[in-house]
Amino acid sequence: MAKLPHQLQREHSHRVEALFSSLDAGRLTLRNRLAVAPMTRVSATAEGMPTQHMSDYYTAFAEGGFGLVVTEGLYTDKAFSQGYLFQPGLTEARQRDGWRPIVERVHDAGSRMVAQLMHAGALSQGSAYSAGTRGPSAIRPKGQQMAFYRGSGTYPVPTAMSFEEIAQAVKGFADAALLAREAASTAWRSMLRTAICSTNSSRRASIFATIAMAVPSRDGCA
C-alpha cells in the first residue's frame, strides 16, 4: 500500500531533525551530523606549514555550524609521502605547533576536527624531500597528472617499496597520529588514508592490508 502524503512528510521531517541532532562517534561528540569533507587546498607553505588563510578557511566552516571538519590530506613523513607541492604536513613539532591555533579556533566555534593522514605513494606529483615516487609495486598509475597539483602527462612508474620503506611509511602514520593528538588532545583526532593501498597500484595486497589495520591502533581522539 502506498504511503499517504502526510506519512511521507512526517518521515522527511524526522530525517531532517536527525541530521541536526548530536552524534557520539567513538570518543568524539558532534553537535550535529554535518561534516566538511576533506578538500585539497594547496595553500600551505613550501615547508608544509599551515597558514593564516588555512586557519580562516577551516574556522569559517566551524562558525557556519558544521559538527565535524576534516582537514585536507597531511603528508606523514619526509621520505615519499608528500603528494604535491605546498601540501601541509604533520611530520615534526613545528608543523604540529602550526596546527594548534587552527584546531583551537575550530574547537572554540563548537566543532570537532579530524586530521586526514595520507601517503601519496605512486600518485605523488611533487615533493620537497625526494625525487621519484615509491609504490607497493612498479605499476604506472592510471590516468593523467593534474595541473592543479602542478603535474602534467602520465604518472611515472614508481619504484617498488622495499620492506624497510614500508616500515618507514607505517612509522610515519603512527608518528603523525601522535603529533595530531599533541596538537590539541581535546579537539582533534586523526584518520588514516593512504594511496599506497590502492588495488590499482599494488600486487602486495596482504602487506598493505596489514598496514591499514595496524596504524590506527595508535590513533587518538577526543
Image: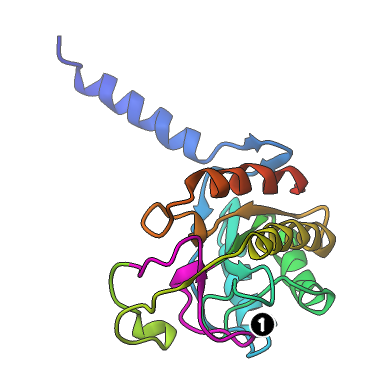
Residue 43 locus on image (x, y percent): 56, 84
Residue 198 locus on image (x, y percent): 43, 55
The quarter holding residue 177 reads bottom right
Would you name the residue on which mark 1 appears? 48
Left or right of 80 in this view: 26: right
Residue type of the residue flagged with mark 1: Gly
Seen in the picture, residue 151 relative to 179 is either above or below; the reply is: below
Element assignment for label 1: loop
The quarter holding residue 3 reads top left
Pick whichever, 48 or 153, lies toward us: 153
Tell me which residue sits at (69%, 49%) in the image.
215
Q: Quadrant of the N terminus?
A: top left
Pick whichever, 217 or 96, lies toward us: 217
Seen in the picture, residue 29 relative to 53 is either above or below; the reply is: above
The quarter holding residue 174 reads bottom right
* Residue furthest out toward the top: 1
Pick whichever, 113 or 74, lies toward us: 74
Q: From this viewpoint, is residue 10 visible?
A: yes
Tell me which residue sits at (57%, 84%) in the image.
127
Q: Badge 1: few (under 14), some or many (20 or more) residues near its Cα, within 10 Å?
A: many
Left or right of 28 in this view: 5: left
Q: Is residue 222 magenta?
A: no
Q: From this viewpoint, is residue 222 visible?
A: no
Residue 48 locus on image (x, y percent): 66, 82
Left or right of 154 in this view: 100: right
* Residue furthest out toward the left: 1
Q: Is residue 135 magenta?
A: yes
Magenta stretch, overall SS: loop
Tell me which residue sits at (43%, 56%) in the image.
202
Tell me which residue sits at (45%, 62%) in the image.
137
Q: What stretch of residues is rendered in magenta?
A: 120-141
Seen in the picture, residue 18 relative to 78 is either above or below; the reply is: above
